[in-house]
Image (spheres, grey):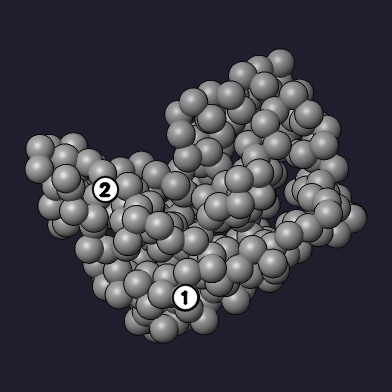
Amino acid sequence: MQRQSHIIKQKTGPDDPELQAMLQEALAQVSPEDVIAIADELAERHARLFSGLRLDSASLASSFADIASAVAHTKANAQAITNYFAQGDYSLFEQLLHGEAPAPVRVAVFVEKLNALDTRLALELATGLLHNTFPSQHWLWTRWLWDPTVGTGILPLLAGSVHNLQADNLADGYVRVGAVTAMSVKFGEGTGLFTPALTDDPKRAPFANSAFLACAYSVYLYGTTSWRLSREFNGLLPTLPNMARRLLGLKKSPSPQTPLPMGEGQG
């Protein structure tokens, strides 16, 4: 028999009264420097890839593979996005990024028009484009934040319930994800990870909460899965900051990191 991870017990969910306390304790494994480094990488990518993004077909065609990788957290999903737009028709992006309708409506229209894509992936593309292009104005809606199809994600865990995230349509869903994302800042502040070096820096601050939420989900994901794995398999898992980087479409850090604590099960 294997012992459960000491990070987070096996069965946790939005209704678990102990979850927030456990997450807060587990997040002690993340340093403020980790969150700052991830926010810096997001800011650098914003400046390089999304700031002043040109939406003409020639410009987008040359950078679209990088954009797809930035908004998808797996290579397979990035490839699915790239394949979908293989014909080079990016006309929907102008309306998404610069249309006159409220952003939630633009997101919903964009996703509905991409009906051949998985809805979750279309949402990740739409909100990834908006957040990475205008990080202070728009927020992400990824499946690791809130996946209504299976009722999972870090946002309902931090909020303590799925109630505030339940919506009748995509536009309302995006509004609700934004509200709970904003509420999660208070939780983040309680962890000590929101330092002045992070929140007072004009380049880092717009990406502070995305970096924090990716770290929080990585802690949760590791804690609920690693207890089932042998010591050898745990040794192959990426470090916690690099798990967070993967969720945000960033490349793995080449610098040495402290590995996550390994499970205590027998090999």
Q: Percent x, y for residue 109?
A: 85, 43
Q: Percent x, y for residue 214?
A: 44, 57
What residue type is disc 1 on?
Pro
Q: Picture quarter containing residue 193?
A: bottom left
The mark found on residue 110 in the picture is: none
Q: Picture quarter containing residue 168?
A: bottom right
Q: Nearer the viewer, residue 33 or 26?
A: 26
Is the residue marked by circle 2 packed among few (<14), some (14-19), or many (20+) residues within 10 Å?
many
Give me the residue at 53% from left, 55% from top. 153
What residue type is disc 2 on?
Ser
Q: Could you tell me which secondary element the residue under label 2 belongs to?
A: helix
Whether residue 19 sits left or right of residue 121 in the image: it is left
Residue lying at the far left of the rendered structure:
266
Q: Is residue 190 above or below residue 256?
A: below
Q: Nearer the viewer, residue 49 or 5?
A: 5
Give me the residue at 61% from left, 28% from top. 81
Quadrant containing the N terminus in the rendered view: top left
Q: Is residue 217 above or below residue 242?
A: below
Q: Could you tell me which secondary element the residue under label 1 belongs to?
A: loop
The mark found on residue 17 in the picture is: 1
Whether residue 240 sits left or right of residue 148 in the image: it is left
Give me the residue at 56% from left, 34% from top. 68
How many marks do you count on the picture?
2
Q: Percent x, y for residue 116?
A: 74, 24
Q: In the rendered image, is residue 38 in sight?
A: no
Residue lying at the far top of the rendered structure:
87
Q: CA distance from mark 2 to mark 1?
A: 22 Å
Mark toward the start of the polypeptide (2 vs 1): 1
Q: In the rendered image, is residue 158 in sight?
A: yes
The mark found on residue 226 in the picture is: 2
Residue lying at the far right of the rendered structure:
100
